[in-house]
Amino acid sequence: MSQVLEQSIQINATATVVERCISDLALMHRWLNPVLRCEPVGEAWSTDVGSKSRFIIQIPLLKPTLNSVVVERQPGLVVWEFQGFFQGRDRWECQPTEKGTLLLNRFEYDIPNPLVSWGFNTFAASWTKQDMQAQLRRLKRVAEEQN
């Protein structure tokens, strides 16, 4: 059964600027959780449909990895689908507003292994939700600095 974590934040920057913070790897690493590292699979980083990347959690020895592929891409929208200890989608959508951009992040996932699912729900689900909020605040700061 899929679970969903959804967050949003108002950013005082254009949707184009906010989107660049999501699609530019150097800018992404400025707001991504420091224990996460994202790297392209293949020659170069891209958010075009079909582009592959991996998100690695920097836990000593374990380094759990989510392999992802961009499955939907439009102006202001990037959707990564991932496989690994999680299966699901991470959707980033920029909605222009009068004051800038409303950024929506929807993390929909399933954890097929019951033991891993129990562990995540018991120990990490609330931390993940808080981390998503913190990432959005950091992304807001990075985007507003670009103006």
Image: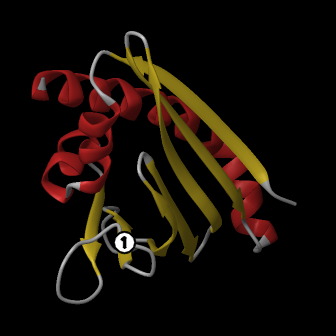
Residue drawn 77% across the image and 56% down it? 118
Can I make out residue 69 in this image? yes
Q: Is residue 33 visible?
A: no
Does residue 27 appear to the left or right of 139 in the view shown?
Answer: left
Number of residue marks? 1
> How packed is label 1: few (under 14 Cα within 10 Å), some, or many (20 or more)?
some
Q: Residue at x 77, y 73 (%)?
A: 112
- Say which element carries label 1: loop
Q: Is residue 109 left or right of residue 2?
A: left
Expressed as whole percent of the image width and height from the top left, the position of residue 142 reads 19, 30
Is residue 118 positioned above or below 66 on the image? above
Specify the farthest residue to the bottom. Answer: 42
Coordinates of residue 75 in the picture (x, y in percent): 41, 51
Which quadrant holds residue 124? top right
Residue 35 place in picture, x, y as percent: 30, 52
Q: Nearer the viewer, residue 124 or 92?
A: 92
Under mark 1, the amino acid is: Asp
Q: Quadrant of the N terminus?
A: bottom right
Against 98, residue 54 (above or below) is below
Q: Name the image quarter holding the C terminus.
A: top left
Asked if 45 appears above or below 131 in the picture, the reply is: below
The structure residue drawn at horizontal position 68% and vertical position 53%, both measured from the top left corner, is 108
Comparing 99 with 44, the one in front is 99
- Residue drawn 35% across the image and 75% down it: 53
Image coordinates for residue 145, horizontal then vertical, percent: 12, 23
In depth, the one of 24 and 77 nearer the eye is 77
Is residue 38 positioned above or below 103 on the image?
Answer: below
Which colouring convention does the figure follow? Answer: secondary structure
From the viewer's perspective, is 146 left or right of 71?
Answer: left
Residue reaching furthest to the top: 99
Give the residue number, with chain letter if any, for mark 1.
Answer: 48
